Image (cartoon, rainbow, N blue to C red):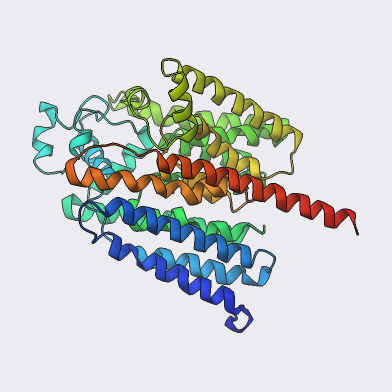
């Protein structure tokens, strides 16, 4: 890699410096007093997203800025890597599930407040809001949690953070080596990726890295490897299975067989091993989707008008969206947006959309940008406003205005993309 700073425009340098300064604000966000943590996170995520969009847009037609965007993205991740995540509730839950599994206890049967977990509960902190529920993570994720928990109460959070940082930097390095689109800067500068490394360190960063690996493998026609990677992704979280739609619709007949066989074999092997250990994978997934409502503009509107049938209707809408994805994948085989769409469309109709759920889709935006999805990624951190009240009195009462903001951002992104496409078509027709 060679980066000639003299060839980087002044505007890009200023935006790059601003990106690093905004990333450094994460150190202030974690120090905010109770009642301001959510607002701080929402502001931090929004600023990071808007600056990343500006930096990408200002240099989208300049291939010479590729190295510069990569350096800025990698530097922002390394800059926030030392921030401790020991107090992050989801990380605490990861490590609790891992410690439980490492001790031979089935985390799919034993919740944190069960008597069977009393000894571990005295050692490992667990969030109060999780106390009644068994784990909902697939076996591959639990295995990673168990590995991290081997570091003990002091070292485990840093082992987990190390895994997430390596996955984030690995995704950037893979994109640098394999992607050549005008959108790759959206991956290098991904605001959700930097946000997660700084403050969340959710499993979805690793899921996104695996999805990107699977995409590269399939593009290189290594279908068996691609299938194995999709299977590995499903063992971490269920969403990567949807990448099989564009993969299967675009591959040759022989490639489809290899993809299907390898992915199914990986999933069967992972779950088979879990059953051999006397674990019963599934846990509280049904309870989660039945009880939780958060961050989903479409589902919130749907539930407002047809509360009793909202889940059934959303499932039907999800089926229609998947059918549309299949049609688009077959009808427009050169449109690489379908890879990001495959990882985002399920959440259009979902009842729960935490910001980190969009990380895998955000990484695949490095293959080709998508206006509505960009709008969603940038606005998603608005939902962190709920943390303010939660920090004060433990109440979980999400406001409506973040959903309105997300919906408007999605529509604005779609409209701007259509406008840019129409202008491009007009310029082409007049030549």
* Residue plotted at (67% across, 57% down): 181
Q: Say if residue 3 shows up in the picture.
A: no
Q: Return the residue found at the far right.
A: 431
Determine whether, in the image, residue 324 is placed left or right of residue 350.
right
Q: Nearer the viewer, residue 263 or 4?
A: 4
The quadrant of the image that shows the C terminus is bottom right
Q: Position of residue 343 (x, y in %)?
A: 54, 39
Determine whether, in the image, residue 409 is placed left or right of residue 328.
left
Work out whether 393 lies above or below 40.
Answer: above
* Residue plotted at (46% across, 68% down): 19
Q: Nearer the viewer, residue 293 or 147?
A: 293
The quadrant of the image that shows the N terminus is bottom right
Q: Position of residue 331 (x, y in %)?
A: 76, 33
Q: Nearer the viewer, residue 207 or 57?
A: 57
Q: Say if residue 201 shows up in the picture.
A: yes
Residue 334, located in which quarter of the rendered image?
top right
């Amino acid at each position: 890699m060679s980066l000639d700073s003299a060839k980087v425009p002044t505007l890009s340098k200023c935006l790059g410096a601003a990106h690093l300064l905004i990333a450094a604000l994460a150190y202030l966000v974690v120090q905010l007093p109770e009642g301001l943590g959510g607002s701080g996170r929402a502001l931090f995520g929004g600023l990071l997203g808007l600056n990343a969009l500006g930096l990408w847009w200002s240099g989208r037609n300049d291939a010479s800025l590729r190295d510069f965007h990569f350096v800025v993205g990698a530097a922002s991740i390394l800059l926030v890597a030392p921030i401790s995540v020991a107090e992050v509730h989801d990380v605490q839950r990861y490590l609790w599930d891992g410690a439980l599994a490492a001790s031979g206890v089935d985390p799919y049967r034993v919740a944190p407040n069960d008597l069977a977990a009393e000894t571990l509960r005295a050692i490992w902190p667990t969030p109060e809001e999780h106390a009644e529920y068994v784990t909902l993570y697939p076996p591959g994720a639990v295995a990673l949690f168990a590995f991290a928990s081997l570091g003990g109460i002091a070292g485990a959070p840093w082992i987990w953070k190390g895994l997430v940082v390596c996955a984030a930097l690995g995704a950037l390095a893979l994109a640098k080596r394999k992607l050549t689109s005008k959108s790759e800067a959206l991956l290098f500068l991904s605001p959700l990726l930097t946000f997660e490394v700084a403050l969340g360190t959710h499993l979805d960063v690793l899921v996104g890295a695996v999805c990107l690996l699977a995409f590269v493998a399939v593009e290189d026609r290594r279908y068996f490897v691609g299938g194995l990677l999709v299977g590995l992704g499903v063992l971490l979280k269920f969403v990567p299975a949807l990448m099989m739609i564009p993969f299967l619709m675009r591959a040759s007949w022989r490639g489809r067989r290899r993809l299907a066989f390898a992915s199914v074999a990986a999933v069967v092997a992972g779950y088979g091993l879990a059953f051999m250990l006397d674990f019963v994978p599934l846990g509280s997934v049904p309870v989660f989707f039945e009880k939780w409502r958060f961050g989903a503009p479409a589902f919130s509107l749907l539930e407002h008008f047809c509360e009793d049938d909202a889940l059934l209707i959303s499932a039907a809408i999800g089926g229609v969206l998947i059918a549309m994805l299949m049609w688009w994948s077959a009808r427009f085989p050169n449109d690489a947006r379908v890879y990001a769409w495959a990882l985002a469309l399920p959440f259009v109709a979902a009842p729960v959309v935490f910001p980190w759920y969009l990380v895998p889709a955000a990484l695949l935006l490095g293959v080709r940008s998508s206006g509505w999805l960009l709008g969603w990624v940038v606005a998603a951190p608005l939902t962190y406003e709920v943390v303010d009240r939660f920090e004060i009195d433990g109440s979980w009462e999400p406001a409506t205005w973040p959903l309105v903001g997300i919906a408007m951002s999605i529509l604005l992104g779609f409209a701007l993309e259509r406008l840019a496409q129409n202008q491009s078509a007009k310029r082409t027709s007049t030549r």
